[in-house]
Amino acid sequence: MLGGRRPPPEPEPLSHSEPASPLTARRSQALKGRVRVPGDKSISHRALILSAMTVGETRIGGLLEGEDVINTAKVMRALGARVERTGEGAWSVHGVGVAGFGQPLAPLDFGNSGTGCRLVMGAVAGCPVTALFDGDGSLRKRPMKRVLDPLMRIGAQALEMAEGGRLPLKLQGARDPLPILYESPVASAQLKSAVLLAGLAAPGETIVIEKEATRDHTEKMLTHFGAQVVVENVGEHGRRVTLKGRPELSPSPLQVPADPSSAAFPLAAALLGADGASAFIARSSIEPARQRIAFAHRLRVTCQPDEDGLRHVPGHLLFAHQAERRRIDQVQVPPDQLREGRVAPLLCVLPQ
């Protein structure tokens, strides 16, 4: 014993109701197929939130129907939008306009979704309502103060919050929101998006400056719904995003592209197959997938948008093809790509 403490007991072996049976994996023939992977989660959240801020009905196709996105849909209902599921991945959202959210009658429960919570904080910050933001035990551990700081400059107030700026958090939206110029201290698409969503309700121009450019889903989708957004390059890697406030966002049909992280697995299947393996990945979001595509090229795999897919906006069909299978001995991956999970799904399933 060390320090008077007994060592922890050895874990008991797992029990099985049925005897285990061996599994055998063998090299297959060339893989050829076409798959439709689930919708992009980040775009699904934004599709629901921005549709709820339009005036009229928006029809969304390809929405990811995981728990996080469903919680965002429930929150939009609680804030006054009419949100209905009309089919598999198909949803109808009747929006209430910019700054049109109503007073929720119960806490807004985001479950485990930090993206949904932070983006809706921005959308609510420009409305004259008070909402209690909450989530599960994991979400309650995540800090929200970094998002609150610019929202309070716009005019919102945090009436109550847990220690360290965490959930549960009661946010009072601004009655007269102000436009701000905000220089983001970190590279965060959620932080940028929260400021832009709050800035929709402010007069004049809301400006966000990023030292390191982040994904631009929000800017593109704001433009899709009719907002005036100007994006300029700043320095070597940064961007300056300028939003003209108080637009009337117009409903517009939206097809959510497939999630590139999920698409990485059928892409890896093309790598693992025999000579001549190929895979079509329907409507993958092309921009976030570029890092994975560049990585695949380094593994001597042809990966490019299929011509037929160019009709799909904002998604494309991706075509992956490996003419000759090669052993992968060593590949150097930049730390930022590992940190952001851009190529990790590929690395997890590649042969050694």
Image (cartoon, helix red, strand yellow):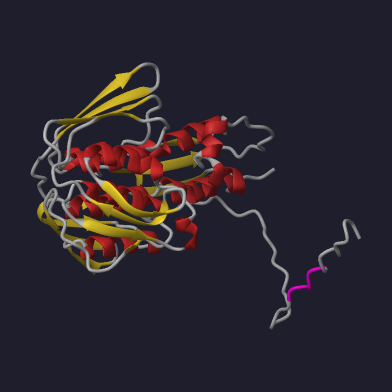
Magenta: predominant secondary structure element?
A: loop
Query: Is 345 rendered above or below residue 205?
Result: below
Residue 13 shown in magenta: yes
User: Which residue lies at the image location 86% right of the left edge and 65% below the top edge?
Assistant: 6
Looking at the rendered structure, the number of numbered marks drawn on it comes to 0
Query: Is 174 rendered above or below residue 336?
Result: below
- Counting from the top left corner in percent of width and height, residue 53 is at 16, 51
- Is residue 305 at all visible to an observer of this figure? no
Q: Nearer the viewer, residue 102 or 311?
A: 102
Residue 204 quadrant: top left
- Counting from the top left corner in percent of width and height, residue 276 is at 53, 43
- Counting from the top left corner in percent of width and height, residue 121 is at 29, 50
Residue that extends furthest to the top in the rendered view of this protein: 235
Q: Nearer the viewer, residue 163 or 229?
A: 163
- Is residue 129 at all visible to an observer of this figure? yes
Report whether 321 appears left or right of 352: left
Q: Nearer the viewer, residue 319 or 69?
A: 69
Residue 198 shown in magenta: no
Q: Nearer the viewer, residue 103 or 305?
A: 103
User: Which residue lies at the image location 39% right of the left edge and 17% below the top edge?
Assistant: 236
Please identify the quadrant where the N terminus is shown: bottom right
The magenta-colored residue range is 10-14
User: Which residue lies at the image location 12% right of the left edge and 54% below the top edge?
Assistant: 100
Please identify the quadrant where the C terminus is shown: top right
- Counting from the top left corner in percent of width and height, residue 72 is at 30, 59
Residue that extends furthest to the bottom in the rendered view of this protein: 17
Residue that extends furthest to the right in the rendered view of this protein: 1
Report whether 235 appears left or right of 201: right
